[in-house]
Amino acid sequence: MKANQFFFLSILVLFSARSMAQTTAKKFTWGLKVGANFSQLDDLSYQTPRLGSDGLPVMSGGNVVYDFFQQNDAHTTGLVGGAYARIGRKMYIQPEVLFSVKGGKMDLIRQGLETRSFDTRVGSIDLPLLLGIKLGPLRLNAGPMASLRVLDGDLKGALKEYTSQSVRQSIQQAQFGYQAGIGLSFSGMQLDLRREGGLGKSASTTAEPTTPASVSPRSSLWQLTVGFGF
C-alpha cells in the first residue's frame, strides 16, 4: 500500500472522529495492553545461492548451487504490548503504539541436503489508527496500520533511529497494513481479538536474504490482547 493511500485512510478516520465528537459528549481514556500474536507467513517463495565458508557461491558441475526458501503453513507465537488512547463514547477513534513480534515458519530446501524448517521472527513498532463503535460491552473496530521494523529486537535503538530522522524517511521504511476485530470491555478490562494483514508491499526493499536470520517476510496474524483502561 502506498503511503498516500495510508494517509488518505487515516484522514478519513480522523474526519469521522471529529464529526462524531460534535454529536456526542467527548470522552478520553487511555490504557496499557499485552498479549500474543499467532502469525503465519504470507505467500513467500524464492531461491538464493548457497554460500561457502569463504562467502563465495558453492559450485557443482560448473553451476551455482541454489537453496530454496518457502513458507510453511504452521503458525508462530510472539508477544505484543503497548499503549492505546480512546476518544469518543459510542463511536470512537483509537490510536495505538505497540511493540509486536511476528513471523512464521519457513522450509529451507537445499539441493543434495536434508530440508530444514525454522522459525523466522521480526520485531516491529506498530501504529494502528482504528475507528470503532460500542454496542454495549462489545466493541467493533478497524483501520489502517503502519509498521516500522525493529532490528535484532533493539527497541531502544529503533526508537532513537526513527525519532532522529525525518518523517519522510520513516514513511519510506514503513510497511502498511490493517487491523480489524472485536473487543469486550468489562470492569476496566479490555479484551480484544483482531485480524492483521498487509496491504501491498513494503515501501522500501532490502537485498535478497541469504540466510534464515536475514529473512524479513510479511505475515498475517490473529492477535489476542488483554488491557486495562484508565
Image (cartoon, grey):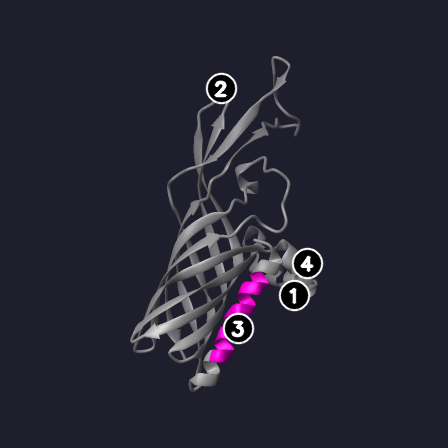
Residue depicted at x 49% and y 38%: 44
| Magenta span of residues | 6-19
Q: Is residue 206 above or below residue 166?
A: above
Residue depicted at x 45% and y 69%: 131
Q: Between residue 115 and residue 48, name the one nearer to us.
A: 48
**Amino acid type of the residue that numbered disc 3 sits on in the rendered structure:** Leu
| Marked residue nearer the N-terminal end (4 or 3) | 3
Secondary structure beneath dot 2 equals loop
**Amino acid type of the residue that numbered disc 1 sits on in the rendered structure:** Thr
| Marked residue nearer the N-terminal end (1 or 4) | 1
* Residue that badge 3 annotates: 14
**Amino acid type of the residue that numbered disc 2 sits on in the rendered structure:** Gly
* Residue that badge 2 annotates: 112
Task: Report crowding for label 2: few under 14, some 14 to 19, many 20 or more residues within 10 A (C-alpha).
Answer: few
Spatial CA span between label 2 and label 4:
43 Å
**Amino acid type of the residue that numbered disc 4 sits on in the rendered structure:** Gln
Residue depicted at x 34% and y 77%: 188
In the rendering, at what x and y percent does residue 24 appear?
42, 84
Spatial CA span between label 3 and label 1:
23 Å
Residue depicted at x 54% and y 27%: 67
* Residue that badge 4 annotates: 169
| Marked residue nearer the N-terminal end (3 or 2) | 3
Q: Quadrant of the C terminus?
A: bottom left
Secondary structure beneath dot 3 equals helix
* Residue that badge 1 annotates: 163
Spatial CA span between label 1 and label 2:
47 Å
Spatial CA span between label 1 and label 4:
10 Å
Q: Is residue 124 left or right of residue 195?
A: right
Residue 191 on the magenta span:
no
